[in-house]
Amino acid sequence: MTLTEVRRNPVGIRPRAVVVGVTAVVATLVVSVFSLGTGDFPIAPADVVATLFGAGNPAHEFIINELRLPRLIVAILVGAALAAGGAVFQSLVRNPLGSPDMLGVTNGASTAALVVVILGGSDLQLSIAAIAGGMTATLLIQLIAGRALHGFRFILVGVGMAAILTGISGYLLTRGQQMENARALLWLTGSLDGRSWTQAVPLLVVLGAVLPLLVLACGPGLRILEMGDDAASALGVPVSLLRNGALLAAALLVSFGAAAAGPVAFVALIAPHLAKRLTRAPGPNLLPSIAVGALLLSGADFIAQHALDDRVLPVGVITGLVGGAYLVWLLTTERRAGRI
Amino acid sequence: MALAAVLVLSVGFGARFLSSGEVWAGLTDPASDYYRIVHEMRLPRTLLGLMVGMALGLAGAIMQALTRNPLADPGLLGINAGASAAVASAAVFFGVGTFFGYVWFALAGAAVVTALVYAVGGGRSATPARLALAGAALNATLYSYVSATLLSDTQAIDKVKFWTAGSLASADFETVELLLPFFLAGLLAGLLVARPLNALSLGDDAARALGARPGVIRVAVIVAVTLLCGSATAACGPIVFVGLLIPHLVRPVTGPDLRWMLPYTAVLAPVLLLGADVLGRILGSPGELQVGTVTAVLGGPLFLYLVRAAK
């Protein structure tokens, strides 16, 4: 992408990106309908759609609106939040592996949440702690890395922070009793079991506020920023304001996502990658990433619920399996291309 | 210099046993009240700490030389986590419960990750930040794998939970004896590659001109790292930063020559590990803070300082 291209098309709408985004949204809707229709009480896709538009029978309405829909909404929202956060992080540190899972943000949320689990706190307290922990870790990393937020220093500080927090989490796990540990590990893996409107509504409000702001205010700037700080300054981008703002917004999204479903592995890493690969566009690809993230997590949760007959897997197991394989593949190909 | 080494070593031991007179009595006099404490609890723990510290320090030093990367550390790069993941699988899927069973799984896990890290970080294009990030990604993957695996078996959680944080608490003479052959093999391999690795640091062509064979050396280093990290992790779980920090502290004193660096590292690394262990028991009393947690909390800020100082 050249400078003239940026000037001519500042919002950066590309036909290919639109196609990818729309396809991912449609695929998410299809997965949603199947997900809502599958379970101990199967409902035909046509009835699912009818119920969603308010024309179903009372039994279907109860099952879908009260039991299955909240879980699906949380899956979609968490997927979108993690993907958006991951896209911003990868763009800011200019490294395809620079996702919040690796840079200590998610670890901050996990460690704080573990403290609450060990102390036997409620689910609400756990969520608040996770959000506070994620934000605190981000601010600390930013503070230690210095104002300049150089890509590589931010990475190293983040990696160091992640290692410290992992050590503390290990200690916390040994303090817990067997039941608490089971709860802690379930949370750490990431699970959507028993999610209701109480989780979905706050998430919806936060995403509704932060996502449009991020996409509209930071998206174009981030795209220019990837060409280098000097070029971006020359084009009139307020570099440090944009960076700090985008970083905080991304950390907020990731922390809220983790608070609602646990630190589901790899969504923040993979969704932006897939989006970028599919759109072949430079920049953070925020909207396609969000759509792909929603598709990934809702799809993974569908698999997690129905892969085994006798029990429901935590969704993090599925994303972890897929993500681990993807990571190994990514490490080898990116290495060959000399980008890592 | 040998005197300094012995001195440091004895400080490590001295800090370990709080009253030196009682320790001496416990060590030598079977009639003493402390004999059982010292011989059955303190001594194996100290020996284990000594071995694990040496193993991690040496592994860190030779990995830093091999990858020409100052931030290489078996903990940060995910090698210890690879061994952990293999042990968790062993405990959950194969019902393995003894150290002798764990160690083979740990070695296999460490070998796979070492090879992967080398594949990613061995080339010239890999900068420290990129390698660290690749390692962090592997770490995150492997930890999520460990928690997902343990989740399926609540019995296994209790069995291995101490061990996932990195702890010397399970030490007894049996573990020490079982660990010893693996540790000695790794130690020998590590010390033997010191000289050829020096040649390799001049570049492959220069090394060949000096009569070394780069391919053979690399394989030997990977074997040594695998033996050292795998056996250390099998004995007491993943421990970070020991392999990173000690070579950094040693290098200004000895220079980059591995023949000098490795002995110094081998002396100082156990000092750090045992010191962290003692600190963990003081701070955590009446229980204990796991040594892995202490090294992470102590070593982490030092790592952050190194990053800041490096510009």
Image (cartoon, grey):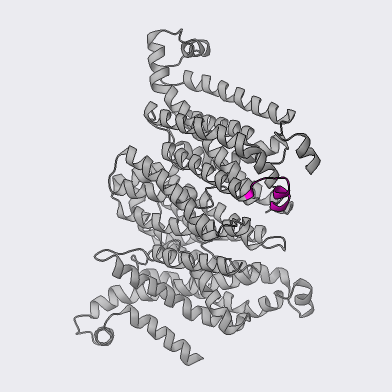
B34 with respect to B258 (left or right): left
Residue at image location 62% in from the left, 36% down from the top:
A286
Tell me where the magenta segment starts and ends, as one range: A229-239
Residue A236 in magenta stretch? yes
Vertical placement of A131 versus A292: above or below? below
In this view, the residue in front, A25 or A12, is A12
Q: Quadrant of residue B278?
A: bottom left
Q: Position of residue B87 (x, y in %)?
A: 45, 55
Q: Residue drawn 76% across and 80% down?
A: B210
| Residue found at x 30% / y 55% | A175
Q: How many marks?
A: 0
Name the residue: 71% across, 41% down: A282
In the picture, which quadrant includes the C terminus of chain B? bottom right
Compare residues A34 and A262 and report the one nearer the observer.
A262
In the image, residue B300 lies at what x, y percent?
A: 47, 64
Residue A223 relative to residue A309: left or right:
right
Residue B151 can be seen in this image: no
Dominant secondary structure of the residues highlighted in magenta in the image:
helix
Task: Verify whether residue B109 appears in magenta.
Answer: no
Residue B210 vertical placement versus B121 (above, below): below
B138 or B224, which lies in front? B138
Q: Position of residue B227 (x, y in %)?
A: 53, 67
Q: Is residue A110 visible?
A: yes
**Left or right: A338 with respect to B246?**
right
Residue B101 to residue B258: above or below: above
